[in-house]
Amino acid sequence: MEKFEGLNVSSKFAICGLPLRVDSYKTCSFGCRYCFANGRKIMEFEKNLLIANTDSIERRLQRIFKDKDYDPHNFLDALIANGVTWHCGGMSDPFQPINEKLKVTNRIIDITNDYGISILFSTKSDTLHGANVRPDLHTFQLSVSNVHNRRDIEPEVPDIESRYRMFCELKERGFKVGIRIQPFIPGVSDLGIVEMFRDADHFTIEGLKIIPQEGEQKDFCFGELGMKPSHFTQMGLLNMLPEWRYDLYQPFVAYFNEHGMSFSISDNDMRWLGNNVCCCGDKLAKHATGFDVTAMIMKRNNRPWSLDNVLKEVGCYRQCKAYDLFTSNRTEGCKTVEDFYRMRFGRSSSPFSPKFQYYHAPTLF
């Protein structure tokens, strides 16, 4: 079976406090119709399946921690050596049904447990396939778009009752468990999610996004879900209009604030609405980087932050190589993390710039 390098630094390191990303599989069989990475036909899915090269992960960890042999200017090595929490499940679900057979996620867990690596798992599953997870190392984000078992939207996702049972079991075992309302779908995602999972350790909201070139995804969103192209704006991907999102999120924000609940907004232009330094939740991220946009907003108490503020937080990662994180037409000559910030921080199109935030309430400034 063909393998890929499952562990990488995300090119989104400036907007996410957990830039260490690990995926067990490429593509996903849960078949969510809003997702551009789905694989609804199981037979075709298995034919095209790629799995993570776990031997490569094991060799890297041995080199860093046992052999003490790594380049501090290698961004991936430096983040690992400094104990930054890994995020597992950003591109495909680590506990999707194929894992029952192949156990690639379990293998990653067994390898990283030997080195005390903390991992935040994002999943829609109702089972962990016997993985050796530990509450001292692992946390969970359960992705929930609705509590109505909408098979027309998520045809292969386990029913919400079985997922709630797993949530309760994890909590009983001492795990920190958050709920990620992603994607937030107008007319589908409602406060029933918060009420069902009210004792979650954290809530994150992120609006629906559409790939402009993905015809099937667009047809579903603009056809069956009843949204219109005019409801979206181009921000790399097609994002829901900020004023629309802001209004839709207000009942959730009011509920969270009224009940003193931990929450974040993961949309790049609304990070200021939440109350956590990490958009995945402070309780779920055992060690975040601290130089991403959410951290800077919260550390600066919702005041604009400067390039100097960011570079101070970047610290030992300034000279780490960053050019390999971007396609050749996007590097713009930058070689290091510091170069990246210096070249792009002042642009209103940069999602890690203060200019990018949608401040519905300008009195914050």
Image (spheres, rainbow, N blue to C red):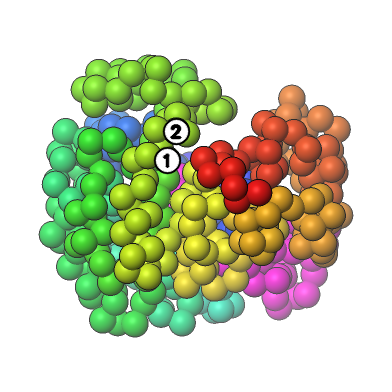
Task: State the mark number for residue 156.
Answer: none
Q: Would residue 117 be found to the left or right of residue 253 on screen?
A: right
How far across and down, in percent of the image, does residue 259 sit?
Answer: 32, 68
Q: Which residue is mark 1?
A: 246
Q: Secondary structure at mark 2?
A: helix
Q: CA distance from mark 1 to mark 2?
A: 5 Å
Would you identify the image quadrant in which residue 68 lies?
bottom right
Magenta segment includes 142: no
> In this rendering, is residue 209 above or below 98?
above
Residue 317 in view: no
How far across and down, in percent of the image, does residue 157 sit?
Answer: 22, 47
Q: Would residue 312 be found to the left or right of residue 153 on screen?
A: right
Would you identify the image quadrant in which residue 295 lies?
bottom right
Could you tell me the amino acid type at mark 2?
Glu
Cβ–Cβ below 8 Å for labels 1 and 2?
Answer: yes
Mark 1: give few (<14), some (14-19) or many (20+) Cα within 10 Å.
some
Q: Residue at x 23, y 47 (%)?
A: 190
Magenta segment includes 74: yes
Image quadrant in which the N terminus is located: top left
How far across and down, in percent of the image, does residue 151 sit?
Answer: 15, 38
Q: 166 and 235: which one is in front?
A: 235
Q: Residue at x 44, y 33 (%)?
A: 243
**Which stretch appears magenta?**
62-91
How far across and down, in percent of the image, does residue 213 sit?
Answer: 46, 18
Q: Residue at x 80, y 69 (%)?
A: 69
Q: Which residue is mark 2?
A: 243
